[in-house]
Image (tube, rainbow, N blue to C red):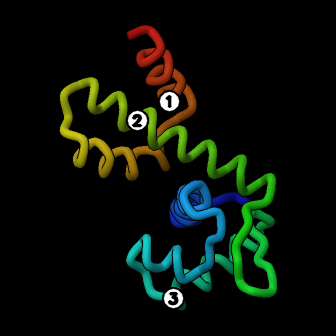
Amino acid sequence: MSLQESGEMYLETIYVLTKKNKAVRSIDVAEHMGYSKPSVSRAVGLLKQGGYVVADKEGYLTLTDAGIEAANKIYERHTVISSVLIALGVDEKTATDDACRIEHVISDRSFDAMKRYLEER
């Protein structure tokens, strides 16, 4: 299953919340993203169908290996792009907001160039 931008955003959110709280439920995702519970429930259902997330009987979400791989990739893109924009003089809030949009559409080639840029600084 190919992930759309919204699916990537949900995976990244679950990943970030898991790093902070260890136990994550759909309500935590809804509160963090500012989305309705039904919207998050639908998205989590799609992520489950795609093999990216599993939920236990109490509703706690766990990323599968495929989910961790996809979330790591998008989270790395977010942090690297934010760092590059900040290095270029963009304020942190704007850099973070812009990185959130760019991370979903940037090519691997351009992203790799950004990573090299940061490593060479």
Type of amino acid under label 3: Lys
Q: Are marks 2 and 1 in contact (CB under 8 Å)?
A: yes
Asked if residue 4 shows in the view, the reply is no
Residue shown at 40% from the left, 35% from the top: 81
Q: Secondary structure at mark 1?
A: helix
In this picture, residue 52 sits left or right of residue 115: right
Residue shown at 43% from the left, 78% from the top: 31
Number of residues whose C-alpha sits closer than 10 Å to that of mark 3, classed few (under 14), some (14–19) or many (20 or more):
some
In this picture, residue 22 sits left or right of residue 95: right
Q: Secondary structure at mark 2?
A: helix
**Callout in the foreground (3, 1):** 3
In this picture, residue 43 sits left or right of residue 30: right
- Quadrant in which residue 83 is drawn: top left
Determine which residue is flagged by label 3: 37
Vertical placement of residue 82 versus 58, above or below? above
Q: Quadrant of the N terminus?
A: bottom right
Distance CA(mark 3)–CA(mark 1)? 33 Å
Residue 71, image x, y percentages: 63, 51
Determine which residue is flagged by label 2: 81
Distance CA(mark 2)–CA(mark 3)? 30 Å
Numbered mark located on residue 34 in the image: none
Type of amino acid under label 1: Phe
Asked if residue 24 shows in the view, the reply is yes
Type of amino acid under label 2: Ile
Residue 5, image x, y percentages: 52, 60
Distance CA(mark 2)–CA(mark 1)? 8 Å
Residues 90 and 2: in front is 90
Determine which residue is flagged by label 1: 111
Residues 109 and 51: in front is 51
